[in-house]
Image: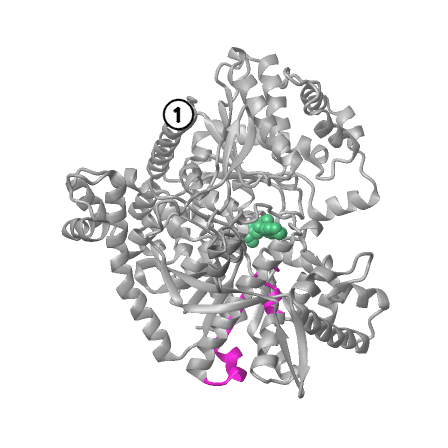
Amino acid sequence: MKALIVDVLRHRVGKDERAAKPHDWFQAAVLSVRDKIIDQWFASTRRTYDEGGKRVYYLSMEFLIGRLMRDAMSNLGLTRDVENALRDHGFDLAQLEDLEPDAALGNGGLGRLAACFMESLATLDIPAYGYGIRYVNGMFRQRVDDGWQVELPETWLAHGNPWEFDRRESAYRVGFGGEVLEANGGVTWRPAEQVEASAVDTPVVGWRGARVNTLRLWTASALDPLRLDAFNAGDHAGALAEQVKADSLVRVLYPADNTPAGQELRLRQEFFFSSASIQDILRRHVQYHGDVRSLPEKAAIQLNDTHPSVAVAELMRLLIDVYGLEFDEAWDVTKATIAYTNHTLLPEALESWPLPLFERLLPRHMQIVYAINSRVLREAGRAGMSGEQIAAISLIDEGGERRVRMANLAFVGAHSVNGVAALHTELMKSTVFSDLHALYPTRINNKTNGVTPRRWLQQCNPGLTKVIREGIGDAFLDDAEKLTDLNALAGDAQFGERLAEVKRANKVALAAHLKQVMGIRLNPDALFDVQIKRIHEYKRQLLNLVETVALYDQIRSHPERDWVPRVKILGGKAAPSYHNAKLIIKLTNDIARRINSDPSVGGLLKVVFVPNYNVSFAEKIIPAADLSEQISTAGMEASGTGNMKFALNGALTIGTLDGANIEIKDRVGDDNIVIFGLTADEVNEKRANGYNPREIIEGNRELRQAVNAIASGVFSPDDPDRYKGLMGGLYDHDWFMLCADFDSYTQGQRKVDAIWQDEALWRKSAIHNIANVGWFSSDRTIGEYAREIWGVK
Ligand code: 26V
């Protein structure tokens, strides 16, 4: 490895050892590791072709990969070698790793899930391709200026991307607009505009190098990138206009999470990548298997949410217009190939497009959507459904401005529709999809999410991994469910001591990092209480903040009590147009400034808002967390995956009966998790039968004082009215039921304090958490998809 790295440094990076800067060494190390991957990559591809088996295609607008260096080294078993080689050259691997930018091609949970799934697919030796967009600017970089979020473009490609391979030979034309021509029985779509999609491939290595799969991201270029005639005539900008338009397709990731962008560019992005992916899948299939009719035997296409659901219409169009299948036959092939995963029930997040826009951009697809719709509505009619039910099933929303409903299109075009946690799947059946479920009662199924234990245990927490290996051996490295052997060590004081030492070391490391990036000093012996995730009202960062203010009050009124020292760590990005989310970030910082500078709390309470939370930051924070905040309004968080990562790293959870929290509770046991608040049924019942938050506030002194303090400007003396509206919302409607859950949340937090004060009890609980969440490995999840949806071994 040492010789290889020097060779690469000289001949491919083009630097000699004496002139090379740290970044050059990093580049050389990456390329050296990449060389080891490539042989495996070719071998995997060849094996798939030889075996002629079924392939899985995961279509996702988002892949939130983060860094790849450690992942690749660790999965190939090269970490030690690279570390030693670099040390011999005078470099520390950990420092060089920090030079790698995050590939942040996603917003949050949905994108990170796609990345975990890619790694598990390779680990389970399943031939698979991820398909997405190679955004030039991924998730924005968040700066905090005077407490406010400021968005800056993320330039992850500034120094090139050593992991990717241009595949210009894999290029497809994608059309927009134009007209549909009918001639001698056939239909052709004559688009008004065309762009070229070309593939950029990144290898994805499975654990122990089991397989290397491909993440294929599309980039766009104009068919005629420089119009020389225009250029020579002096129109230098006009000559580039088409290229600029093509660039815009892959320029930015839409930074909204759970609220549709509703803009034409977004629909163009969706069609661009869906069309290129479907064309690529069909080309590969026809090349190796000859006939498109056998597609379902050789290909399984999974739609990650509705973002790629126009693929249903695109596959139909290609099968009918290009490959000459009859509509019925094409429909059978499409449904047997495609499956759809839903990731949210929030009504505002369900995508739909104004019909005139859809028709103008995709006229042929509009016809196909109508044809599918009339078929589906006929089936509903034959099943004896009411007019109201039929209207709910329709692919077209006829209420007011007519719109195409992408979730309904995905639902009817798929043979499987899955939710991402047990509660979420049941709610899909009873709420948004109730009528579609009545018509197709076997289609909805559950696949509870998971996370890859390679990144989220082994790589991010080597200390803990080592202690576990000493305790139960190595079997858990290949099968996370073997972590249950740790249950036998829950009462072992020595083992508990070693775990506590690792946790403390991780907290010291995090504190050092935060000292460096924010200049704040934290006590590693305090309880690290963490809420990191996108900022959204349903996730209820505000509940955490109001409770923090109440606690601050209590500590000041009763300084003599035996308070548990706490550090409240919050982090996350707000959608740039989401006013309240941005205000919540400012409030966090306003509260932090006041509390952190108040000598009367004597260091018992600190509040930290970590700027620019991303995957790499999560890898530093999660191993150092004692308490994981999973406090969404019940029924609103589809699954959550952060909850799993924290438990796997030995944090206790304080959470509601929402998403996967419920399944975590079932596994770790009621004594090892702190559950509070209304159930999803109770939330519904309250919303239906009238809910009076004002009465609750008036009846609860702690809550009232905290809310009024925030509302009256105690934390914002420079602008006392800043939080009037936000707090007024709690009095008036409190849609997310913060007030209803405040009291039981507070009690939950005091229960956390009590467990913390019993050191042995806390350690035992932490062990039970680590021991019993191996089931939330994405290997288990992908195994279920493979067996129950895709039919692959
Ligand atoms: C919707 C839209 C609408 C158009 C603009 C861009 C955009 C981006 C994302 C979304 C939907 C996001 C849905 C999502 O991330 N859901 C999360 O999925 C996780 C993985 O299943 C799950 O753990 C979280 O609970 C769920 O919120």
- How many numbered callouts? 1
> Which residue is rendered at x = 59% and y = 14% of the image?
556
Q: Quadrant of the C terminus?
A: bottom left
- Residue 390 to residue 357: above or below: below
How far across and down, in percent of the image, does residue 74 sit? 30, 52
Residue in view at x 30 percent, y 59 percent: 208
Which residues, given as a range, are shown in magenta?
290-312
Instruction: Kindly give the residue lying farthest to the right in the view shown.
Output: 387
Q: Is residue 311 magenta?
A: yes
Side of 583 relative to 3 (left or right): right
Residue visible at 34% across and 58% down in the picture = 207
Of 34 and 782, which appears nearest the observer? 34
Question: Which residue is the site of mark 1?
Answer: 515
Q: Is residue 639 visible?
A: no
Q: Is 150 on the left-hand or right-hand side of 362?
A: left
Left or right for 705, reference 388: left
Crowdedness near tag 1: few (<14), some (14–19) or many (≥20) residues, C-alpha within 10 Å:
few
Quarter of the image where one finds residue 206: bottom left
Q: Position of residue 686 (x, y in %)?
A: 78, 42
x and y percentages locating residue 567 in the rendered image? 49, 26
Displayed quadrant of residue 515: top left
Residue 185 seen in the current view = yes
Colouring rule applied to residues: one colour
- Amino acid carrying mark 1 in the image: Lys
Q: Is residue 171 found inside the magenta-colored segment of the image?
A: no
